[in-house]
Amino acid sequence: MSFKMNFKFKDRIGQARDGIRVYLHEPVAIMEKELMTYFYTPIAYIVITAFLVVTGIFFFKDFFYFNQAEMRGFFQLLPLILTLVVPAVTMRLFAEEIHSGTIETLMTLPVTTVKTVIGKFFAATIFVTLMLAPTLVYLVSIIIVGSPDPGPIIGGYLGAVLLAGAYSAVGILASSLSRNQIVAFIVGLIICFSLWLIDKIIIFLPNKLAFLEYFGTDYHFRNISRGIIDSRDIIYFLSIIVISILLTTKILDDRR
Amino acid sequence: MITVQGITKKFGDITAVNNITFSIREGEITGLLGPNGAGKTTTLRMLTCFLKPDSGTITIGRYNVDDNPVEVRSIIGYLPESAPVYGDMIVYDYLCFIAAVRRIDDPRRIKEIGDLCGISEVMHMDISQLSKGYRQRVGLAQALIHDPDILILDEPTSGLDPNQIIEIRNLIREIGKKKTIILSTHILPEVEATCDRVIIIDRGTIVADDSTENLQTESGGRKRIIVKIAGAGYTALADELRNLAGVVKVEDLHDSELVSARVTSDGGGDIRPELFKMISGRNWVLYEMVQEQRSLERVFRDLTGGGAQ
């Protein structure tokens, strides 16, 4: 009996996996195309270089001063840097398609709008994650010189990927609002920056509004990057992603 | 194959398409003809589910556009106006992308479609570097890659040189043997050259819907016949012609060698037998008698009020 149930359960998982594979076929195709386009154009290299230079400066600024084998300086500023970088990565995703008219080809392919948005979201998130990858060099260098606490570093990178996802989804939403990439960038920047800023301005607000802190990205990022992985923080980032994707889908469908 | 029932689309205060109804049978090549801004592109965009009609229904194959947009899109190949394609990709990667989204696994299909559309030699080039003609063909390859039942082409030959236009037309004719094609254009010879059927739209409404042949000859009712004779003066000929039943107008063509006249009849019946009997009865020599084809251009100008927009 128990074997039979087990067997059935495995079957279910297999079915679900096949279902996901079928569902994600088009999003993955769109993602591959977007990633390819990123690396065809110089944008990718410019953004990655700028990102590494800036994070490098902040990583090493206080590193020798504190004489600690940790990446706190890097993770402290990462949310703010991503606020600036992610909208630059996502700005073209829909704005350019609307501007050049390719949206007409894209939206008349046999793909639902939400799948298109998911594909672009994957592309942006993976691109930002790839951009974070070279910073592992810092990690290697501190492992060589000392013995860092793994918790904050694992948490920091997990938080960074979640943050990259949340900002990417918000940036794509901004990109679907305009045919102008600069406008898309600025709108994305404003939304991301506001999300970053919320928990910083809380001290100016009456106590009753203190709950607003929970809406801030930096608040949740700080929690995770302390090395404490709490489901609430993960749910926060996932909610931002889901809400932004659904809003983007709605906006694109309403254009019809 | 395609049934369009009373569709209307408004953009703000402007009614782009106003309550159009038509249906297209399988295997027909239909030309959607109209001046700029008549609503051709809007109509095609609604057929391809890019735009949603404000009212009315569209059925394509077995599917309703509202309920099954994804299924509809999968049986349609669409070449949008001015063929927007991703400039910063190479042709091959672009076609691979379209093939992947359309779930075509066979890589040979890309080569096949490249040969069919004549883009094999530019496969490795950036699309942004291609000429207009090549870009149009890449767009066409994109529309044909999944071997769709229905092909919708929005101004497929605009911006091409005369040789390319003929090539594309031949390609459309070739493909049209097996598929249902709708193409929009404001170029009249294009319709005459490629389409079995014409739908003329003006200011969002259908003003004519008939086979190309019928529109060319019948629809205005009036027929024009050119007569060239010898053996009499123009005045004598003209007098006799005016006496024939059904003749509305007689004009002198001022031919230097023969006496020629253009006769316009009211279209009630064919006047040619009477005309011939009259001329032979007078012992005049008939050199030529031709019924003018009413060119589509005139139909178009008559129906769309000069076509100026």
Image: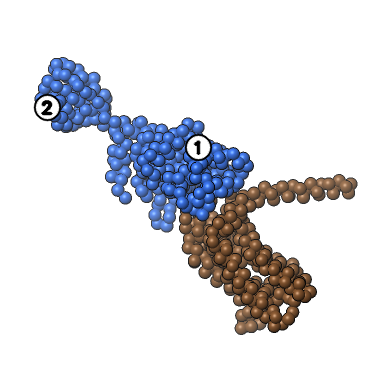
Chain colours: A brown, B blue
Q: Chain of mark 1?
A: B
Q: Earlier in the sequence, mark 2 or mark 1?
A: 1
- Are the residues under marks 2 and 1 on the same chain? yes
Q: Would you name the residue on which mark 1 appears?
A: B116
Q: Position of residue B65 (x, y in %)?
A: 53, 45
Q: Position of residue B72 (x, y in %)?
A: 55, 43
SS class of the residue under badge 1?
Answer: helix
Judged left or right of residue B227, residue A139 is right
Q: Position of residue B241 (x, y in %)?
A: 16, 25
Q: Classify mark 2: residues with Cα within 10 Å, few (<14), some (14-19) or many (20+).
A: some
Q: State which mark lies toward you, 2 or 1.
A: 1
Furthest toward the right, the residue is A1
Residue at x 66% of width, y 75% of height: A59
Residue sitting nearer the eye, A202 or A78: A78
Judged left or right of residue B250, residue A67 is right
Q: Is residue B59 visible?
A: no
Q: Is residue A54 above or below residue B147?
A: below
Q: Mark 1: which amino acid?
A: Leu
Q: Classify mark 1: residues with Cα within 10 Å, few (<14), some (14-19) or many (20+).
A: some
Q: Position of residue A192 (x, y in %)?
A: 59, 70
Residue at x 29% of width, y 33% of height: B294
Residue at x 23% of width, y 20% of height: B273
Label annotation for residue A41:
none
SS class of the residue under badge 2?
Answer: helix
Q: Mark 2: which amino acid?
A: Tyr
Residue sitting nearer the eye, B10 or B262: B262
Residue sitting nearer the eye, A14 or A65: A65
Residue at x 14% of width, y 18% of height: B284
